[in-house]
Image (cartoon, rainbow, N blue to C red):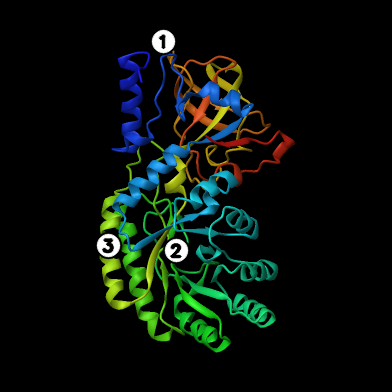
Amino acid sequence: MRCRSAGAVQRLAGWFAAMIGDLPSVIWQRNDDGEFIVAGKPLSEIVAAVGSTPCYLYDRGRIQQRISALRAQLPEAVQLHYAVKANPMPALVCRMAALVDGLDVASAGELRIALDSGMDPARISFAGPGKSDAELAQAHAAGILVNVESFREINVLVRASERTGTAARVAVRVNLPFELRASGMKMSGGARPFGIDAERVPEMLGRIRDSGLAFEGFHLFAGSQNLHAEAIIEAQTRSYELALGLIEHCPQPPRLLNLGGGFGIPYTLRDTALDVHAVCDNLATLAARARRDMPGARLAIELGRYLVGEAGIYVARVIERKISHEQVFLIVDGGMHHHLAASGNLGQVMRRNYPVAVNRLGADKEIASISGPLCTPLDLLADRAELDVAEAGDLVVVFQSGAYGRSASPRGFLSHPDVIEALV
């Protein structure tokens, strides 16, 4: 597809190459008019078909490409699960159900979406602290695997099993005695609300044995959003060895070892893409060990952001262009109530802009901030970013927005309209 000029192509490709390394599949091309191409069509046409801005657009072709590329490197013996919490949009989850080996949910709401997707309940698992009695009963009734995280959950599932005459399927989520180094969000090591402290796991396994529940394995999730292959490799290897040391306490040989996720995606120019090949090589080594150490057990990884994050964009329209003390503000019709992460208010210690762009190539560039319609200075989608000069009516695009977007945002804040989502 031709672009407006060779220089424009070089600027765009160079910018994305610096951000994502050697992953050309996620470069968003422009057409002759400078519009981004989404699912084979100009962005303005997609927005018109969706109905309005603001909107999230998820490119099913890019999701397919990401999963195919990962499958090509992932050992056949390792299953690929999708963490629904990354993006629970029903149409997207239905698409994912046809592409992965299992779905992992974190609430009864996500469980309903997973069941509606057509995924075999035997390949759905439920993790998360504070599962209610009703959620546990629902999970058991649906026949899914529950990653138990407390002795209370065991007791509730025992009662549910006694009522139905069918043993609940359980795996033990372990609070690992180490952290995932360089992780954007650490979920193990030290005092955590997640899982069972490693030293108490033998006690829990004994309780499962005595209660007659159907034990299936372990859930070992150390953290998320990590771009360092060596850290993920270390966490996976140590998780495997911990599980191996627990086998003697298991009610029956484990059938599943879920090694979690942690695969990150780059968000800024300073980020370097994860060396997935190195991680997959290590998984091949662990799978070979498992064939000897745990006959009949399967390994799995649980990914969310890595599978869908780079396939999604958030699109807002410029309402007006304002200048205050010589600083340019593009006031748009969407903001932090739809995309909290892009505003820097979802766990960032220091605010960093997501990659953003205007949906047309102009002759001039400028430094501008993209601000939403909310009455708070926190409503900032980009702070002093270099952009093509934009005017009222132009579309602004926030990339890397396929994960932890709409569902992770305070959509009721100040009662502005909700955001549209579309799988295109």
- Where is residue 162? Give x, y as percent: 66, 83
Amino acid of disc 2: Phe
Residue visible at 54% across and 85% down in the picture? 207
Quadrant containing the N terminus is top left
Whether label 1 touches label 3, CB < 8 Å: no
x and y percentages locating residue 97 in the rendered image: 50, 52
Residue 271, how many percent across, how many down?
Answer: 35, 41
Q: Pointer 1: what residue? A: 363
Of circles 2 and 3, the one toward us is 3
Label 1, secondary structure: give it.
Answer: loop
**Left or right side of 99 for 157:** right
Crowding at mark 1 (Cα within 10 Å: few <14, some 14-19, many 20+):
few
Q: Residues within 10 Å of mark 2 (few under 14, many from 20)?
A: many
Q: Is residue 277 above or below residue 235?
A: above
**Residue receiving disc 2:** 221
Above or below, comparing residue 316 to residue 204 in the picture: above
Around disc 3, counting alpha carbons within 10 Å, would you say few (fewer than 14), some (14 to 19), or many (20 or more)? some
Amino acid type, mark 3: Ala
